[in-house]
Amino acid sequence: MSAFIDLQVASENGDLPSEEQLTSWASAAVRDERDEAEISIRIVDTEEGQELNNQWRKKDYATNVLSFPSDLPAELELPLLGDLVICAPVVEREAKEQQKTITSHWAHMVIHGTLHLLGYDHIEDDEAEAMEALETRIMKNLGYDSPYEDKTEDNG
């Protein structure tokens, strides 16, 4: 199964993933969940990310990814899954802070956001464990490390 991505780039950041990469990551997240999926992905800079996070979550800072699930009636049986807004500067900063490659962190943000569109959440501990396990499995299937491995620990 493949997701269809409607990509909107409203970012000055030049180091963005390709539409093919975004589609691949979203497709991996929906593969076991749906036959068809349409997702709008809007890549933004800090100002718009902060405005949207403040408007919708009442948090006055830019966050990495915002998910807006489609609220179409189920009887319409349309493949529209919803919208993701990803803040490029936040993703880049987090990748550096967490000592991850920018590509793997982008993959994680698309997968994480897509799973939210599918109804997964991480408010309760058991939900968080299930979502993190699924994210880890999808990431590893794509050849990436677990997004929850702490790269800053001293393992020696």
Image (tube, rainbow, N blue to C red):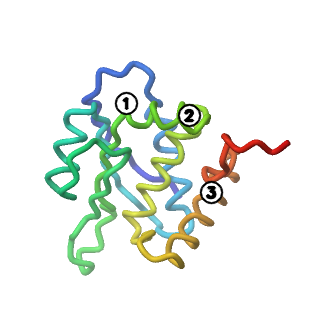
Secondary structure under tag 2 reads helix
Query: In the picture, which quadrant includes the C terminus?
Result: top right
Residue 53: give x, y in percent of width and height: 22, 50
Q: Residue at x 27, y 33 (%)?
A: 46
Task: Answer with left or right where residue 35 lies relative to residue 72.
Answer: right
Label drawn at residue 138: 3
Residue 16 figure quarter:
top left
Give the vertical position of 126 relative to 101 (above or below). Answer: below
Task: Answer with left or right where residue 27 lies relative to residue 140.
Answer: left
Label drawn at residue 103: 2
Of badges 1 and 3, the one in the foreground is: 1
Secondary structure under tag 3 reads helix
Residue 154: give x, y in percent of width and height: 76, 42
- Local packing at callout 2 (Cα closer than 10 Å; few below 14, some 14-19, many 20+) is some
- Local packing at callout 3 (Cα closer than 10 Å; few below 14, some 14-19, many 20+) is many
Label drawn at residue 89: 1
The reply to whether dot 1 and dot 3 touch (C-beta < 8 Å) is no
Kind of residue indicated by mark 1: Pro
Distance Cα–Cα, label 2 vs label 1? 13 Å
The reply to whether dot 2 and dot 1 touch (C-beta < 8 Å) is no
